[in-house]
Amino acid sequence: MLEELSIRNYALIDSITLSFRPGFNVLTGETGAGKSIIVGSLSFLMGAKTETDIIRSGCEEAAVSAVISIDSGNTDVIDWLKSRDIESEEDSNSVRTIIARRNIKTSGRGSMYIQNVPVTRQDLTEFMGLLFDIHGQHNHESLLKKENHRRYLDRFAEIEDEVNDFSRTFLELADKRKTMDASLKSDREREERLELLQYAVDEIEKAAVHSGEIRELESEAQKLTDFEKLIGFVKTAAGCFFDGDQSVLSLSRRAKNAMDSAASVDSSLGEINRRIENIYYEAEDIAGDFRSYRDNLSFDPQRLEDVDERLALLYKLRKKYSSKQDAAGTEEEAILLYKKNAQDEIEALNGAEENRGKLKSQISALEKIVVAKAQELNKKRTDASARLSRLISGILQNLGMPNARFQVEISPKQQDGRASFGPWGADEVNFLISANKGEPLKELAKIASGGELSRVMLAIKTALLSENAGEAGDFQGTGAQTLIFDEIDTGIGGEVALKVGEYLTQIGRLMQIFCVTHLASIAVRADNHFKVEKKTEGGRTYTGIGPLNPDGRKKEIARMLAGDSGEAALAHANELMQKYGNRR
C-alpha cells in the first residue's frame, strides 16, 4: 500500500508530500489543474521512460519517492527483495516498509533506489509492478490487440511456465526440422556446399591467421612508411638528451660532479645531492636504452613490402569471412570463428546420411511431445476461458451493462487452411463482446461507445488481476496492492457512473484504489478525497494537492456538479454524500 508520496520539481509541482490511507481514494480538480501529473509522477517512480522536460522550469532535477507498506502475505515482493539482498523494516504486525525513489537531472542522467540500494530501471519497473497497476484512458491499446489476448488468458490460467516450456520444445523441434531439411538437399547442392566450405577452411588455414596480427602489422607498416620522419625525431631527441656538451646527460653529469664537491663542504646539501645523483643515473640509463634503439634502427624496404602483402591478404580474408555481427573479440578471431563453423558444417554434411536416421527418430519423439503439450494447454485454456468469460460478464453486469456478454474465443491455429502449431501452442485466442441484447459478439476493437469501452476495459483489467475471483463477478483480490485509474470514467455518466463508483468502492474494500475522476457520483463514494489545484504565486504557477475535510469535500462535490458552490449545488452535494457516501 502507498503510505506516502513525495514529489519535488516535477512538471508544475514544486514540492509536496502526501500521506495516503487504505480504501478508495479520489483525486479531483478543475480541468488542467494537474490531476494527471500525480499519476505521471507515479508512472515515473514505476520506471516509465521519461524525458528531461518533466523537470520543473528553472530546476536542476526532479525527484519522486514513496513509502510503501508490504503485507507479509505478499511473498512475490518479499522474495524479490530477498533475492537482491534488500532489507525491509518489519513492524509488530508483520508489515514491512520499503522506500523507493527516483530522480532525473537536466543532463538526462538519473538514479533509482530501493531502500538506498541502487537498482536499474528494469529492476525498478519489475518491483513496482508487483505493487502497483496503473490503468488510464490511454492504456487500452494492448488489450485491443488480438495478438495479446493469448498472453492475458495464459496469465489468468496461471500456465505461463507451461507455455514457456512448450515454446522451448517447439523451438527445439523447429531447429531439428531445419537440420533435417538441410540434410535432405540434393547431392549436387551438398557437394557444392562442401566444396565452398572446404575452400574457405583451406584458405584460412594456409594463411595461418593469429589473433591481433592485423593491429601489429598496421603499426609496423606505419613505422616503416614514416621511417624518415622517425629518424629525424630520434636524432633530435638524441641531440637533446645525450649528444653534445649541452645535452641533458652532459648537464646532469656536470651538476652531479659540482654537487659532490658542494656536499663535501656543506653536509646539509646531502639530500639534494642524492636527488641530483638519481636524476643523473636515471638519465644515463635512459640514454643507454635510447642509444641502443637508435643504433639498431634501420629501414628494410623488403620488410615493408612483406608487411603490405600480408596485410592485403588479411584484409581480403576479413572482408570474406567476418562481419559486424560476429561475436568474436578481434577481427582475426572472427575469421577463425568462420573457419570453425565451416568445419562443423562440413562434419554435419559428411555425416548427414549417418545421422539422418537418428535425427528422424528425435523429430518423431519431439512431435509427439509437442502434440501432447499443445493438447494440455488447449484444455487448460478452454477451462480458463469459460471462467474468465463468466467473470468478466458478471463484472460488466455490475457496471451497468446487464445484457453484456463477454466471450474468450479459442480456435485452432491455421496455416494454409490446415491446423498448425506455433511457439505458444495450437490455439488462437480472441476476446469478443456483445454490449447489448440481440447484438452479435464482436471483437473488442469494434466497440463504438467510449463509455462501454471504459467499462469493458475496467472489467477486463480487474478480472485479469484477480485471484480466485467469484463466478458472479465478485472481486476477490489481486497480485498488486494498489490500483490506479486515471480518468477511467471518460465517456460515462448518470446511472452508469453510479455503478462504476459502486464497483470501485467494492474493490476499495479489498485494496487501495486511486481514481482520477471528473464525476461527482464517483467522487462522493470515496473513503479519502484529495483536491488538485493550480495556483499562481510570485509570478510562477504551481500545482498543489491536499486532502479535503467534510466541508471542503462538500464544496468540491458541489463544484463538480454545478461548476460553483451555490446553495442549490451544496444542497445537491449534501444529498449525494448522505445517500452514497462511503460508510466503512
Image: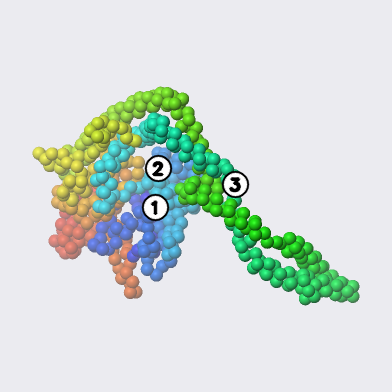
Q: Secondary structure at mark 2?
A: loop
> Which residue occupies the extreme left position in the image?
438
Q: Is residue 121 visible?
A: yes
Of the image marks 2 and 1, the number of the one nearer the N terminus: 1
Q: Tag 2 or tag 3, which sits nearer the N-term?
A: 2
10 Å crowding of disc 2: few (<14), some (14-19), many (20+) = some
Up-down: is 226 above or below 326? below
- Which of pointers 3 and 2 indicates the residue nearer the eye? 3
Up-down relation of residue 505 to residue 572 (above or below)? above
Q: Which mark is residue 210?
A: 3
| In this rendering, the label closer to the viewer, 1 or 3 | 3
Q: Which residue is mark 2?
A: 71
Of residues 440 and 558, which is closer to you in this image? 440
Q: Give the number of the mark in front: 2 or 1.
A: 1
Picture residue at 68% right of the left edge, 61% below the top? 299
Q: Report how far apart the C-alphas of labels 3 and 2 lie in the structure.
A: 60 Å
Is residue 302 shown left or right of residue 440? right
Whole-number angstrom distance, CA of label 2 to CA of label 1: 22 Å
Q: Quadrant of residue 151?
A: top left
Residue at position x 49%, y 52% from top?
118
Q: Amino acid at mark 3?
A: His
Label drawn at residue 47: 1
Mark 1: amino acid: Gly
